[in-house]
Image: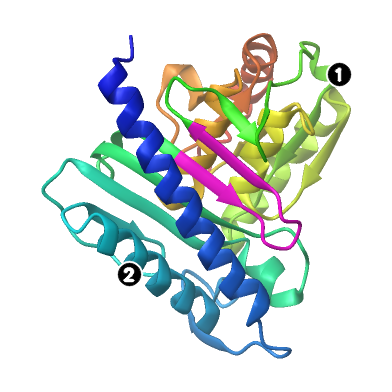
Amino acid sequence: MTSSADSALAHDLLVLAERAARAAGDLIRDERPDRLGVSATKTSPTDVVTVMDERSEALLRDLLLRERPDDGLLGEEGGGRAGSTGITWVVDPIDGTVNYLYGLPAYAVSVAAVTGDVRGGDWDVLAGCVHNPASGETFTAARGGGAFLDGRPLRVSDVSDPAQALVATGFGYEAERRRRQAEVVAAVLPQVRDIRRLGSAAIDLCQVACGRVDAYFERGLQPWDMAAGTLVAREAGAIVSGLAGAAPGEQFVLAAGPSLHAALEQILAPLRPDADAV
């Protein structure tokens, strides 16, 4: 049960997370160059890092640690530091970088305050904000306090039959992983209403929370991809997990309402979506 002190802390962290996400969102929206340059690559040539990614992360780091200088921080673009409070800010300065690069309006700033061992996979999210500066939508959640879209309470869909489920997914950047993920999608597609691929894990998780899609699954997510979105989805009533009761993480993530989650897991598990080779 969440204590009043825990609730107050989560609320305060959420206020800061939202303020930081909105500030970074203003930056990447208002100062997006007409022609973006790629400053580096990550896991493959198709996984781009833009100058705006780095500027956004620097803004988030400066704002969050100015307010809470003893906290830790883990950022997608390498901005990491240990803290002494037990709280780590997990930030994605632009989730959906390729969409941003191409001018597609499905990208977000994701900011979450977490406790535990983020790198080791044993962690909990206290507060999270996913802000899409292109649409202006802001998804927020504090642990035990519900999930919201621009102040409106969210609830996952009540779809329980996979055949009626609109399911979102995503693909990795490395060719071999994408080949395996395509095989999984080809097997799942005839068993669901349809598949959507948006290009931002943080937004996908929030779409589950507000019922715009009924479920989401993907392999290869990092903490910054999923921290804030996972809390939003859970606080809206979703189960977010790996397979066979495992915690969600890089190996696999499945998010859906309770009945649909169980049904989709029965479909997915034999396909081994958590493996690059079978």
Image coordinates of residue 183 in percent, x first then y, are 71, 42
Name the quadrant containing residue 271.
top right
Image coordinates of residue 137 in percent, x first then y, are 70, 49
- 170 left or right, relative to 140: right
- 251 left or right, relative to 256: left
Residue under the image location 68 percent in, 12 percent down: 263
- Residue 271 visible from this viewpoint: yes
**Which residue has dot 2 on it?**
62
Which of label 1 and label 2 is nearer to you? Answer: 2
On screen, residue 206 above or below 46 = above
Answer yes or no: do the residues labelled 1 and 2 have beta carbons within 8 Å?
Answer: no
Residue under the image location 79 percent in, 39 percent down: 186
**Which residue has dot 1 on it?**
163
Secondary element at tag 2: helix
Residue 182 is one of the magenta-drawn residues? no
Q: Which residues are magenta?
A: 128-141
- 129 left or right, relative to 3: right
Name the quadrant containing residue 22.
bottom right
Image coordinates of residue 268 in percent, x first then y, are 64, 25
